[in-house]
Image: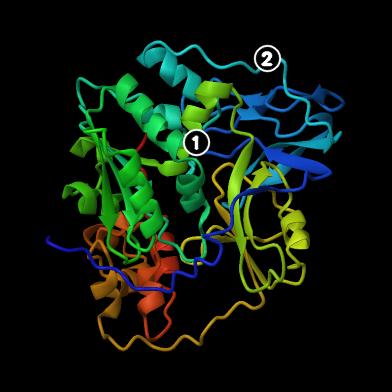
Amino acid sequence: MKTLSGIHISHDKRTENKETALFPLPDEVLIPMSQHMGAPCEPVVKKGDLVTVGQKIGDTDAFMSAPIHSSVSGEVTAIEDFLNTNGTVCKAVRIKSDGKQTVCPDITPPEITDRDSFIHAVRESGLTGLGGAGFPTHIKLNFDAVKTPIDTLIINAAECEPFITSDYRQLMEDPTDVIEGVLMVQKFLGIPYCKICIEGNKPAAIRLMKEKTADIGAVSVVTLPQQYPQGAEKVIIYTAVKRIVAEGELPSNQGVMVMNVSTVAFIKKYADTGMPLVSRRLTLDGDAMTKNQGNYTVPIGTPVSSLLSYTGAEDAKAVLYGGPMMGITLYDTAQPVLKNNNAVLAFRELKKPKMTECIRCGTCIRTCPLHLMPVSIENAYNARDVEELKKLHVMLCMNCGCCSYACPAHRNLAEINQLAKALIPRPKKK
């Protein structure tokens, strides 16, 4: 495999030069106890409790999880059931803000002296991958260095989705946090090399990162092709180090760790301040937003309806967490901002072209970065042929949406791929 396929799409980076501003404090926040892959937390506060910014309000002893902290100071007004966008239900803590943003008195920079204390600090920060998947970061960092030596840290700053510029603003506004966060990860995990990967449509960020790393021999900057989906994990690994992560493998099987640029920057900030993950830098954009489009630091738990009101998008017909290619359409604008959000987009209309019969042109196959056969997967799914789906390697699909975007018949191929994956039995836990 010499090259990876993909598509060329309009970048629409209209907010790239808008510096990050503080979003107005909401009257109340709703903070779900599941904002990560794995087990949800249990609330450690109750109705009527007074809480402060950074105070832990949810935790669990489960291995795959990350604690939850309050983003505002105020009173807990309810512990209620919350319906996640993936259809699962968890508990959520509703807090009425007192407007004071009083910081928790327990907040203090963590003591980090070695690998174990570093991983423990990351766990206590509540950090999950800020690129979208929400994988608990301390789990990723806690690899077995003897069985799986990691030689390369890849920093994903591709930001290849249209509209989103929050990671770009991270690079431009806080480049020192990025570099020092990288060096911390390398130091405590013993990873010798790092490649900061940025898509070529961000020349200012590429220049800045090259200047900042000029005297750091172990860190280099890679300019990625301007072709979606460069930010996909398997794609960025191949582009950066020419290693193939096979079906069933993790990046660590190829001696690589991938971290989002905002994730490593947060690690440095937490090490300096001790303030856990209580806010997110979000891009607010889309044609339904008639004012105040830009990048904002938003308290986690802020209702999306507040974002829409602030940007004049109350009448939006489609509202997304994330970008138009891989984002999730909200079923209710009362949904809150979550840890793994990097954008909220609002559009005046939801365009859905008429779907016609497949014309067997093969465009979906040619554009798939992983050389899958979406048209064949669709047929196997319709027949509920699980064995054929396995042969077609449907589990490799990363839901980038290239097939649906390129299909001249407007088939719902990316959607079918995800439904097809759900038919494959999961390995039983030992």
**What is the CA distance from the residue labelled 1 to the residue labelled 2?**
21 Å
- Classify 261 as above or below 371: above
Quadrant of res 212: top left
Q: Which residue is mark 1?
A: 128
Residue 286's place in the image compared with 71, above or below, is below
For the residue pair 43 and 174, the one nearer the viewer reads as: 174
> Within 10 angstroms of label 1, few (less than 14), some, or many (20 or more) residues?
many
Picture layout, residue 403 above or below residue 124: below
What element does badge 1 sit on? Answer: loop
Can you give x and y, in whole percent of width and height, for residue 57 in the image?
69, 26
Amino acid under disc 2: Asp
Q: Nearer the viewer, residue 242 or 382?
A: 242
Residue positioned 49% across, 19% down in the render = 121
Judged from the image, the secondary structure of the residue bearing numbered disc 2 is loop
Asked whether residue 83 is in view, the answer is yes
Image-based side of 209 in relation to 268, left or right: left
| C-beta proximity under 8 Å, tags 1 and 2 | no
Q: Mark 1 vs mark 2: which is more N-terminal?
A: 2
Residue 373 at x, y percent in the picture = 26, 70
Q: Residue furthest left?
A: 2
- The residue at 26%/22% (across/down) is 190
Image-quadrant location for residue 386: bottom left
Q: Which residue is mark 2?
A: 106
Report the quarter where the N terminus lies: bottom left
The quarter of the picture where residue 257 lies is: top left
Residue nearer the viewer, 83 or 342: 342
In the rendered image, is residue 157 in sight? no
Amino acid type for the residue under numbered disc 1: Thr
Q: Is residue 420 left or right of residue 387?
A: right
* Relative to 23, residue 117 above or below: above
Indicate the quadrant containing the C terminus: top left, top right, bottom left or bottom right.
top left
Q: Residue at x 65, y 27 (%)?
A: 42
